Image: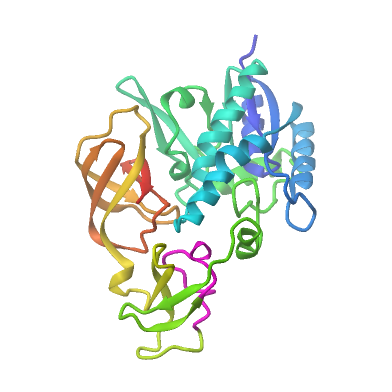
Amino acid sequence: MAERVIVGMSGGVDSSVAALLLKRAGYEVVGLFMKNWEDDDDAEHCSTRQDLVDAAAAAEVIGIELEAVNFAAEYKDRVFAEFLREYAAGRTPNPDVLCNAEIKFKAFLDHAMRLGGSKIATGHYARLGERAGRIELLRGADAAKDQSYFLHRLTQAQLARVLFPVGHLKKSEVRRIAREAGLPNHAKKDSTGICFIGERPFREFLNRYLPRRPGPIVTPAGERVGEHIGLAFYTIGQRKGIGLGGSREGSGEAWYVAKKDPASNTLTVVQGHDHPLLMSRSLEALEASWVAGDAPPRPSRHGAKTRYRQADAACTLTRAADGGISIEFDQPQWAVTAGQSVVLYDGEACLGGAIIA
């Protein structure tokens, strides 16, 4: 009997081609569409219904079954509640990282096993390798689409049950394969926005769940230059939406958010993209997780990302103990943000990461 693989199909081209390639490789493929958000599932903001239609249309062309499952309760408990807690504490979380660890590769994986699957597959741009008896998480072949950053919390047990069929391909190749196979979503726009929630006016969306707590906007010298609507609605390095466009003095450069102080409910802003307060030579991070297992790598040289769309920054891991790490960068890094993930690499291999404190 062919090995049964359950493919998470979102309605997008990447997961559809993942299913197509597995079917061509001789696997018994079943598509699974996940619905994980219900609060305002309407035509104005959420494309869940259209995504399901697209997934079903692709599954029909590929010649596989498509099932649907609702993980909205799990998503709200495991991902969204933490998302709100982090924002309320003045940090800027990355929901995609938590969503992968808790929903796509936990709730979905468990459900797939109940459906008789031996493995799951997704359309992520990442690859798997093996070294010293351990599974390695490798960057996707398309550097512009590599998603290993978002997958750094996956464990050996999870990775042993996962396939990434498009990880060795460029995005242009994925679209070509989809077009030539007659998949109706071959030209569909890539999804953006919050994981499983989608694109929304973010400040308006957040305001439905977190109260506004206005407070002073000050310069590093303590001069009050405005009022913010609540620290949760701003992030380090933010330029737009601060409301200081008409009050620029001195250098005449744009204002940027440089610091948030929850204790005093104060937002500190600076002028100029490269202001010293926006640059960091080191960071501390907590809740570390390592792809190879519980033991962290020894203090050594690495490349690191403090945000997704960023080139690797040369750094030294100086401490890795008690679930936390310390990192020193060769060059100052811009807008290092509490709540985001710092992810370490050894060449092509993603080693793991931690949440910036």
Q: How is the image coloured?
A: rainbow
In the rendered image, the residue lying farthest to the front is: 264
In the depicted structure, whether residue 293 falls above or below residue 333: above
Tell me which corner region of the image, top left, top right, bottom left or bottom right, holds residue 348. Answer: top left
In the depicted structure, whether residue 30 falls above or below residue 141: above
In the depicted structure, whether residue 244 falls above or below residue 228: below
Task: Report x, y in % for residue 280.
Answer: 28, 62
Determine whether, in the image, residue 191 is placed left or right of residue 257: right
Residue sitting nearer the eye, 59 or 326: 326
Task: Report x, y in % for residue 81.
Answer: 57, 45
> Which span of residues is magenta-colored?
228-244
Let me know if residue 165 appears in the view: no
Specify the principal SS of the magenta part: loop
The count of marks equals 0
The N terminus - image quarter: top right
Residue sitting nearer the eye, 32 or 92: 92
Asked if the stretch drawn in magenta spans residue 236, the answer is: yes
Residue sitting nearer the eye, 35 or 80: 80
Q: Residue at x 24, y 39 (%)?
A: 320
Q: Residue at x 59, y 58 (%)?
A: 210
Q: Residue at x 32, y 47 (%)?
A: 285
Tell me which corner region of the image, top left, top right, bottom left or bottom right, holds residue 71. Answer: top right
Task: Report x, y in % for residue 345.
Answer: 32, 42
Task: Report x, y in % for residue 165.
Answer: 55, 32
Asked if the stretch drawn in magenta spans residue 31, the answer is: no
Q: Residue at x 59, y 38 (%)?
A: 77
Determine whether, in the image, residue 274 is placed left or right of residue 77: left
In the rendered image, the residue lying farthest to the top is: 1
